Amino acid sequence: LEAHPEIVTNLQENALYMRGLLNERNIKMRPSNGDRIPIIPIYTYEPMETFHTAKRLYDEGVYVNNVLPPATPEHECLLRTSYMATHTEALLDEALDIIERVLKEDA
């Protein structure tokens, strides 16, 4: 990474970009120690909702990880989204559109 600082910059910019868009669309995220961390957990709260939503996202082309108790407190289940330096804004926008639609449909 020291030899390629642009990778770190792209990764941080992508994380910041996604956090901004998730905030704009009122998608509740778990707070982070930094806006540039490329792992953004999204609250789903209940285990079955989390499993169902993760499956629907996967079927739509967006891969996320489930985070369930005991890794989280009860009723604070999450979908762990991760971003890469190679993601383009177009890909991030497409993923966000899918995430938003699935979350609203499953609510």
Image: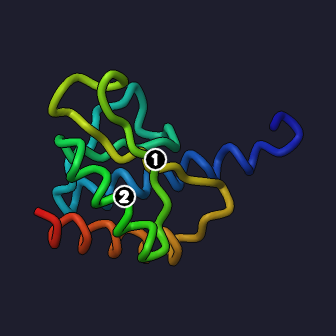
In the image, 6 versus 94, the foreground residue is 94
> To which residue does mark 1 refer?
65
Q: Are the two marked residues, 1 and 2, in contact with CB atoms closer than 8 angstroms?
A: yes
Q: CA distance from mark 1 to mark 2?
A: 7 Å
The residue located at (33%, 75%) in the rendering is 97
Q: Give x and y (percent) for residue 21.
A: 32, 61
The residue located at (31%, 52%) in the rendering is 51
Q: Where residue 54 is drawn, which disc sits there?
A: 2
Q: Give x and y (percent) for residue 2.
A: 83, 34
Determine the secondary structure under disc 1: strand
Q: Where residue 44 is drawn, which disc sits there?
A: none
Q: Outermost residue toward the left?
A: 107
**Residue 46: quadrant of the picture:** top left
Residue 28 located left or right of residue 3: left
Q: Outermost residue toward the right?
A: 3
> Which sits earlier in the primary sequence, circle 1 or circle 2?
2
Name which residue type carries label 1: Asn
Residue 13 located left or right of residue 48: right
Q: Outermost residue toward the front?
A: 48
Q: Give x and y (percent) for residue 29.
A: 27, 43
Name which residue type carries label 2: Ala
The residue located at (65%, 47%) in the rendering is 9
Picture layout, residue 49 above or below residue 80: below
Q: Residues within 10 Å of mark 1 (few under 14, many from 20)?
A: some
Picture layout, residue 25 above or below residue 70: below
Determine the secondary structure under disc 2: helix
Q: How many marks?
A: 2
